[in-house]
Image (cartoon, rainbow, N blue to C red):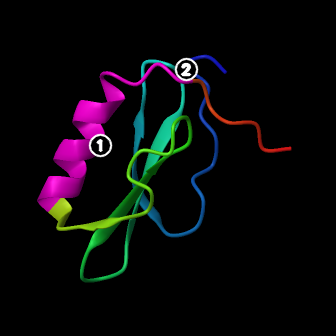
Amino acid sequence: MSASTQSAWPEGVVARYRTVGGADIDLTDDGECVRLLCSGCGFGNDHAYYPPAAHRFAEKHAGKCRRVPRPTA
């Protein structure tokens, strides 16, 4: 998948960061905290963070992660 190709965001995703490897880091908000998960390496492991920290962690990880997205099938 090229960097210019965009896929539909899953329901509940409020922000998405693209890693240098082409994977996505999805952030979901439950009203109290934000959860993040990298589709390449699993970073974030769906752990909860306060919103500003979640965005910082996701952005920093996106600049370093070189894993390609995990296959869906």
SS assignment at label 2 = loop
| Residue 33 image offset from top left, x and y in percent | 26, 74
SS assignment at label 1 = helix
Residue 38 is left or right of residue 14, and the answer is: right
Please tell me which residue is depicted at 60% across the width and 59% down the height of the picture. 10
| Residue 70 image offset from top left, x and y in percent | 67, 36
Query: Going by the picture, which residue comes out furthest to the right?
Result: 73
Amino acid at circle 1: Ala
CB atoms of marks 1 and 2 within 8 Å: no
- Cα separation, mark 1 vs mark 2, equals 19 Å
| Residue 46 image offset from top left, x and y in percent | 43, 62
Q: Nearer the viewer, residue 18 or 21?
A: 21
Please tell me which residue is depicted at 55% across the width and 20% down the height of the picture. 4
Q: Which residue is mark 2?
A: 4
Q: Is residue 66 magenta?
A: yes
Please tell me which residue is depicted at 62% across the width and 32% down the height of the picture. 69
Dominant secondary-structure state across the stretch colored magenta? helix
Give the extent of the magenta segment: 52-67
Residue 69 is left or right of residue 47, and the answer is: right
> Mark 1 vs mark 2: which is more N-terminal?
2
Mark 2 surroundings within 10 Å by alpha-carbon count, few (fewer than 14), some (14 through 19), many (20 or more):
few
Task: Identify whether 26 is placed above or below 51.
Answer: above
Amino acid at circle 2: Ser
Position of the C terminus, as image quadrant, is: top right
Residue 23 is left or right of residue 53, and the answer is: right
Q: Which residue is mark 1?
A: 58
Task: Identify whether 55 is placed above or below 40.
Answer: below
